[in-house]
Amino acid sequence: MSASASAAAQQVLFHFGKWPIPQGEVFFTSALSFAVVNFKPVLPGHVLVCPRRIVPRFADLTPAELSDLWSISQRVGNVVERHFKADSLTFAVQDGPSAGQTVPHVHVHVIPRRAGDFDKNDEIYDKIEQVEKDGLGRVPNKDKGKGKGMDADEDRKPRTLAEMEVEAKQLRAYFPAEEQAIKLD
């Protein structure tokens, strides 16, 4: 990647709560939502879809934002399921602190799934809660997972910006440039 391309990829156009999201991590935008790769995915292909407006609770979304968020989540789900050769999807929303939400910005976890990816299927919800501890999972995970999830025998490793940019670029290719609300490349 050239120096100018790298600088453009690190430009911040979006935030996840208080965390700036480099443009290179974003792979789809609409007028009201954006989709971003995950710093410490629970499973390969685990991404987030967020409203562009930072609101803490699901009830705070306007009807247009709500419709756009779920429409984009469906499109993103179709892409990550195909790209990561999965056969199912988990869509998860934690709405408020008592539900496990740690970042006060509504978001949908979109996670491609395969049979047997966890010993107990519902373990995925514990893993989602763990990665949320500090915005996109940007703190070390102290829980040693025993299931068959990503890096199950050791802590999930944070990914580098370069790794996330590669994944975002791969996923961006599924969405025609003219459908993007913001030019990402």
Image (cartoon, grey):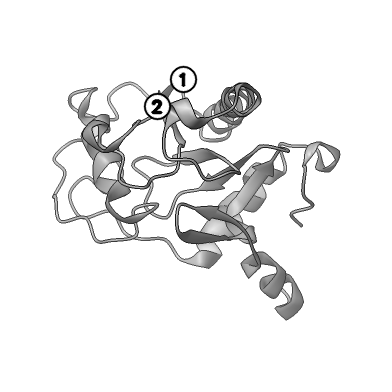
Of marks 1 and 2, which one's residue comes earlier in the chain? 1
User: In which quadrant is the N terminus drawn?
Assistant: bottom right
| Residue 98 on image: x %, y % | 22, 33
Q: Quadrant of residue 5?
A: bottom right
The numbered disc on residue 113 is 2
Q: Is residue 94 left or right of residue 9?
A: left
The answer to whether one can see residue 45 in this image is no
| Residue 144 on image: x %, y % | 13, 49
User: In which quadrant is the C terminus drawn?
Assistant: bottom right
Q: Is residue 151 left or right of residue 172?
A: left
Residue depicted at 21% across the width and 30% down the height: 123
The numbered disc on residue 87 is 1
As drawn, 35 above or below 11: above
Residue depicted at 61% across the width and 44% down the height: 52
| Along the line of sight, the residue nearer the viewer: 70 or 155 | 70
Question: Going by the picture, which residue comes out furthest to the bottom?
Answer: 3
As drawn, 123 above or below 144: above
| Image marks 1 and 2: residues in contact by CB distance under 8 Å | yes
| Along the line of sight, the residue nearer the viewer: 47 or 12 | 12
Q: Is residue 144 left or right of residue 100?
A: left
Q: Categorize mark 2 by other alpha carbons within 10 Å: few (<14), some (14-19), many (20+).
A: many
Question: Going by the picture, which residue comes out furthest to the right?
Answer: 178
| Residue 77 on image: x %, y % | 55, 27
| Alpha carbon separation for disc pair 1 and 2 | 6 Å
Q: Which amino acid is tagged 1?
A: Asp
| Residue 179 on image: x %, y % | 80, 36
Residue depicted at 57% across the width and 23% down the height: 70
Q: Secondary structure at mark 1?
A: loop
Q: Which amino acid is tagged 2?
A: Arg
Q: Secondary structure at mark 2?
A: strand
The answer to whether one can see residue 18 in this image is yes
